[in-house]
Every structure is written in C-alpha cells, then in structure tokens.
Image (cartoon, rainbow, N blue to C red):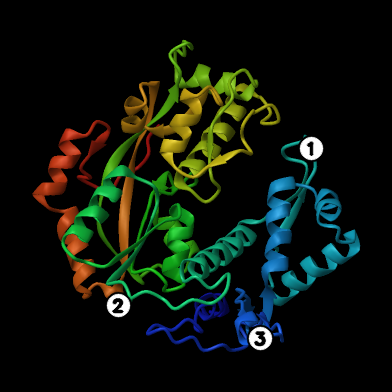
Amino acid sequence: MHNICFALKIFRYLKTDNVFKSNKIIRDVEYKMVGMEDFVVRYNVVIEFSGEPIIDSSMAMVLKAIREKGSLLAVSKSLGIPYARLWENIARLERATGRKIVKTHRGGRSRGGTSLTEFGERLLMLYDAAQARLERAGLTGPARSLSSKPSIVIAYSHDPLMSALISRLLREGIKVNGLCLGSGLSLAMLTLREADVACAHLYDPETGTYNEPYLERFWLFNKVERIGGFLREMVLAYRSEFELESIDSAMKSILLGELKIANRNRGSGTRVYMDHMLRKFARKHKLSMDNVRGYETEFRTHEEVAKQISSGGADVGLTLRYIAEKHELKWIHVTWEPYECYALKERTTNKAVKRIRELLNSEWFKSLLNTISGYSKINSIHKNRN
C-alpha cells in the first residue's frame, strides 16, 4: 500500500488554473537579489516514500548512470562521487523502501558489474514521467503560466495510427495533450494520475502475454479499463544490400556482432521485445550478448530506427512493417503484437475519453487498419506464439 501512496503523491503539488502550490515535494527555488526581473523560480521533482524524500534529481542521475554504465566504479568516476558515498546513498534508498534497488553480477562485459532491479527501473520510470510532466508545464526553467487545461491527456507508445487518431480529435475541436513517451512511461503516467489514457504494447516473457502483467506492476490492476486496440506487425528491417534468410540467422549475426542494430529507448515496448529476442537466441546458440553492436544507442521512434538503417548508421532494427516499407527497407516477419489503450476507470465518463473509445471502434478506424499494411483488428485476447 505504501508503494501506491508514494507514487500518487509525486504530483499532488501540481494544480490547474495556473495555480501552483509549493510544498515539501518542491524545494528548488532560486532568488537573485538584484532586481525583480532577476528573480528566477525553478522546480524539481522529488519522490517521497512514507513522508521521506528518497529520489531527487541527484539520485535519479546516479540511477541513470548505473543503468548506462553497469559499474558502480565507473559511475563514481564519471560523476565525481566517492564510491563509498554512492553505496551509502543506495543503501539508504533500499532501507527506506524495503526493496532492492540495484543488483550485482558476475560475468562478461554486458552482464557483469551493477544494474538496476526491476523495482529500481520502475522507480526511475516514475521519476522520468514526473520530470516529463514538469517540462511540459514549462516549470524546469523560469516559471511560465500554463496554457488552457486540455480536455484529455493521452500518453502513448509511438505509432502512426495513434498520430492519426490524435489529429482527428484535434480537428473535432477536442483539446488533446498527446505525449509520445513509450509504453513504460505511459503506464507510469496513469499511475501518477497525470494521464487519462495510456496506450502500450509491453510483452511479458514469463506469461507470453502483453500489457496485463505490467498493469499489476504499475499498481493499475482493477483501476483501468481497456477502451480499444489493434494488432500491428513487427518486423526485423534491414537494407537491401544484406541477404537475411530467417530470424534465427539474423539474430545469430547480431549476437556475433556481424550486424549493428538500431535499438529503441529503454521503457519502450519494442525495446522490451528486442531484449527478449536477444536473450532467447543467445540461449539457443549459446552465445553472449557482449558482442551486440548498437545496443546502447537509443532511438525514440520507429521512424528514427528506419532512418538510421537507411542512412547506414545501423544494419538492422526491430520496427513496424509499415515503417519498413515506407523507407523501402527489406524485412522479415517477427510477430503480431497487440497495441492497447487503457483509461483510468474514474475518467471513462470524460467526453474526450468516450470519443476515443468510439473512434478506436469506428468504421473510420477499421478502414485505416484495412488499408495500411501491417495492421489488423484484435478479435480475441492475443498471446505471442513466436
């Protein structure tokens, strides 16, 4: 129960109608005593647990560095923080939450050292979602007043059909704040009650299903309602100069470092599935993931992945069939995945939420699914069988 409480407290200070009430969650106000024009008000996200601040911008920077570098010693050197102090701060965080935040590994370059636990990753996602909200409100620099309150906030993973749906809502005069954050951060925005709707496609290798296991992990089980969705075809896209016979041979070449990947950002559903594929084929061929090239370079959209491959910056990448064909890339089928939209139950009576539900199940949307390659309707609960 504590976890839910602290997650929802993060944004309790954010009010609409251009009124912001600072409390102990925000403590980063800077004054320059020269003239009134020199006064600057800055805001900072702080996550509290049971009334105790546990993650601020400094701690978030440490956690991100651990994720990126995979070594506490490397983090100490890069941030200029004494090694002992890093361990002390991590230990304090783990004592406060009663959960492990980091774990240590033995082994090769990619699996040795230190990494975040699943709980640590979720904490960092909540922080990033809160920070994104602060940035959109214009509160990370000098304070500005907010624009008029949107009718609906939609957090979603990148998809061309979602862009079409949001454009349709805007043409109808509905004030939409559309946030292309990736699947993980989108669900985190629902947890924070900072989005009305979140659209995601997160695969769970343990159950072979999408999204529902993550609703529980983000404390959303029984708190959201599915309002629509569709299937989309995921492919391994590559340039025409290569001849890839199968997924198996392509993944083996990636693991051997013969092909460089264009990887999506952490927290995105596509990244989660790519990680699953790498682990699966590494086990099958008894190979290490140490030689995978391009893994640490992240791209936030399918368009960016396709452009990177087309330009020669990478050789192959997991993306949408529609995007691969748009950029005239060759591709191999990987899977059909469900892309689903969820609304907070208490906001399903919102007129804009109702309109999204209507559009996702409308003849207009069905015509898009039928005319754009690599899309289809969801006829039943979908399980990945590849």
Q: Which quadrant of the structure image shows residue 25? A: bottom right
> Can you tell which of label 3 and label 1 is closer to the viewer?
3
Q: Identify the residue shown where x is 72% and y is 53%.
A: 65
Decide if residue 118 is on the left or right side of residue 335.
Answer: right
Q: Earlier in the sequence, mark 3 or mark 2?
A: 3
Whichever of callouts 2 and 1 sits on the residue coming sooner in the sequence is 1
Alpha carbon distance from label 3 to label 1: 58 Å
Neighbour class for label 2 at 10 Å: few (<14), some, many (≥20)?
Answer: few
Q: Residue at x 28, y 41 (%)?
A: 231
Q: Residue at x 9, y 48 (%)?
A: 363
Question: Which amino acid lies under the numbered mark 2 shown in the image of this protein?
Answer: Glu
Q: What label sits on residue 346 in the rendered view?
A: 2
Residue 136 in the image: state x and y as whole percent: 46, 66
Relative vertical location of residue 276 with respect to residue 242 in this rendering, above or below? below
Q: Amino acid at mark 3?
A: Gly
In the image, 245 versus 40, the foreground residue is 40
Residue closer to the observer: 222 or 361: 361
Which numbered disc, 2 or 1, marks the residue closer to the eye?
Answer: 2
Q: Is residue 293 above or below residue 140?
A: above
Q: Secondary structure at mark 3?
A: loop
- How far apart are the alpha carbons under marks 2 and 1? 48 Å
